[in-house]
Amino acid sequence: MTKRRRFTDNFKAKIALEALRGDQTLSQIAARHKLHPNQISQWRLQALDGRGRYLDNIFIERLWQSLKYEAVYLHEMSDGFAAKRVIGDWISFYNTQRPHSALDGNTPDMAYGAAQTRNLAA
């Protein structure tokens, strides 16, 4: 009985990046590293799946930090109704009045509302 091979995360990432580059086919990469093409395909999908997640998390963490410091920590919230009102007011402010440097000083409503208007006109 053959012993099951274990691969390090670094090795999997190296192979996945090689497959993503597309210089060689999965079969060629598999033959060179003595792997099955399905295994490489799976590692490639895992690499793609995780690629955008960390960026999404950064934006959510920034939003959450702004919410905490600009609203939650500044107001005493004795119940869920107060929390809903404070957070709702802040989100409304964030979307309609607060300029964002990533949007060239526009608010999300200005930036995305204008884009939606353009899409509807097209």
Image (cartoon, rainbow, N blue to C red):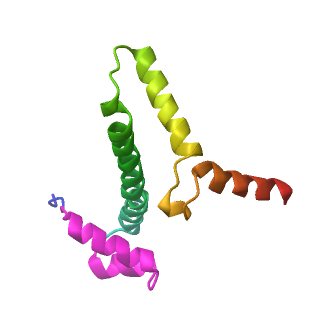
Q: Percent from the top left, x then y, of residue 65?
A: 33, 44
Where 40 falls versus 108 (above or below)? below
Write the residue at 55% across / 65% down.
104
Taking the magenta stretch, the answer to whether it contains residue 54 is no
**In this rendering, would 43 be left or right of 121?**
left
Where 77 falls versus 108 (above or below)? above
**Farthest residue, direction bottom:** 23
Q: Percent from the top left, x then y, of residue 94?
A: 51, 43
Write the residue at 39% across / 39% down.
67
Observer-nearest of 17 and 34: 17
- Magenta residues (range): 5-34
Observer-nearest of 84 and 71: 71
Q: How many marks?
A: 0
Q: Percent from the top left, x then y, of residue 66?
A: 37, 44
Write the residue at 40% across / 69% down.
37
**Which of the image's four quarters has the C terminus?**
bottom right
**Which of the image's four quarters has the N terminus?**
bottom left
Observer-nearest of 117 and 66: 66
Quarter location, residue 7: bottom left
Quarter location, residue 50: bottom left
Write the residue at 23% across / 71% down.
11
Taking the magenta stretch, the answer to whether it contains residue 18 is yes
Q: Percent from the top left, x then y, of residue 22?
A: 46, 80
Where 44 falls versus 53 (above or below)? below
SS assignment for the magenta stretch, majority? helix
**Farthest residue, direction right:** 121
